[in-house]
Image (cartoon, rainbow, N blue to C red):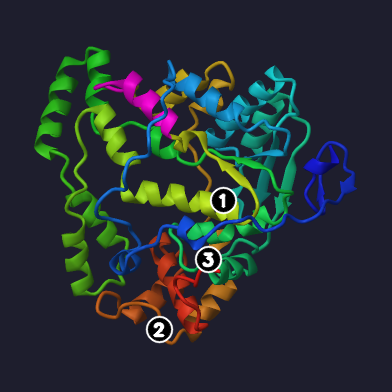
Amino acid sequence: MGWLIPQGITLSESGTRRTAERPSAATYTMNDFVRLRPEEQAFAFPSGEPFARTAEHKQRSATPRVALEQIVKTAFTGIPVYVLFSGGRDSSAILALATAIARSLDADDPIPVTVKHPDAPRSDESDWQDLVLEHLSIRERIVLEFRGEQSLLSEAAQAGLTAHGLLWPSALQLHGAIYTKLVPGVLLTGEGGDLVIEGRRITPLSEAVRNIWVRTSLREAYALVAHRGNDSDLTSALVARSPWLTREGQRRLTEVIHSAKEPLAWNRSLRALVDSRPASMARANFAAVARAHGHSPLSPFDDERFFRALERTGGYWGFGGRTQMMRALFHDLLPDAILSRTTKAAFNETRWLEPEREFARSWNGDGVDHDLIDPERLRSEWLGESPSTHSTISLHAAWLAQNNLPVVPHAA
């Protein structure tokens, strides 16, 4: 199984070190990426009209679980199959499902790929990872130890910015630090799980009805009628998390986010989410970055077949909250302690290190719209103890400008 081993990485069971050739560049074009509009860049939030719906597959899956199984089976074609495995619920579920399918096909187990940041204790999920791997009896894994290789202006980030230009979400620029370590193969991920395997606007009411909590049901029903899918909460949250916006920037942001109303029905709410511009942009750009590094991305939770199975099966009332959905989908594959966990790792301390702060101190103000963004307030945010993730797009735009690089590179 030497072809599964990335260059210079040690497998945890044997301790032997083997090398493999680096991946060759994949064939892709700049049209694979979806770009932010100028105002979206300033607000660090894609908005406006949703993308066109993906063409529907003719074959219908009976259940969401069957849909996931059908999607994951396509990964096993004789090339390496990796699972980007953090230890969180979504990546654990995909690893468990992929392992079960591989063994049913008499194929090699998928290889979990885990990144560890020894200098960032809040990102550590070793205990959860060990619990999953022991439960699945997985003995081979790839562990990459990073000490700054995934900061926002790391070598990997700068290479990504130079090659691909400005991308949203900005964390995609950091994935090259992982991808360049792997022989080309299929990248199975849990991307999209925290969006679609989740309660929706109607969930509190549906939970109350299921449990016959009459008084709670009436209270939840009143709250839904009063709210009516208002977008004011979203606007207020984005403004509060972007204190570097000028008064004009705040006014324009409030105007831009005017169509984010969430339908009441669970299935319609799910469809509105997965078809939305932010979800569609993240889905497209994640896949494009993986392909640019020679890999074949496969994110079952982000697949149209899974969406349609969820819509059809969940109907008006849905499946309940995140834990209920995880249990319904994966109760036979993972311990309940994993399916019901509520903790989550934090990675901000891996993103903002001295290179980022040094850039902030020397920044000349270029790369951002001064009508919408106050450069000094933005600089102050970057130099703060824990800068907002909403400021990372502006950081990358500023770095491109200061290095005389285009936001959208010319296609080769």
Q: Nearer the viewer, residue 255 or 289?
A: 289
Q: Which of 58 and 167 is in front in this view?
A: 58
- Residue 72 on image: x %, y %: 58, 29
Q: Is residue 167 left or right of residue 155?
A: left
Mark 1 neighbour density, 10 Å: few (under 14) some (14–19) many (20 or more): some
Looking at the rendering, which quadrant does residue 70 occupy?
Answer: top right
In front: label 1 or label 3: 3
In front: label 2 or label 3: 3
Query: Which residue is pictured at 35% across the width and 51% down the height?
Result: 278
Query: Which residue is pictured at 56% across the width and 69% down the height?
Result: 412
- Residue 260 on image: x %, y %: 21, 47
The image's mark for residue 164 is 3
Which residue has dot 2 on it? 366
Is residue 219 in the magenta section? no
In front: label 1 or label 2: 2
Q: What element carries label 1?
A: helix
Does residue 190 appear in this view? yes
In the displayed structure, 374 sits above or below 19; it is: below
Looking at the rendering, which quadrant does residue 207 occupy?
Answer: top left
Q: Is residue 184 left or right of residue 324?
A: right
Residue type at tag 1: Arg
Residue type at tag 3: His
Is residue 312 in the magenta section? yes
Q: Is mark 3 on a helix, strand or loop?
A: helix
Find the distance from the CA under tag 1 to the CA under tag 3. Answer: 30 Å
Which residue has dot 1 on it? 122
- Residue 130 on image: x %, y %: 69, 34
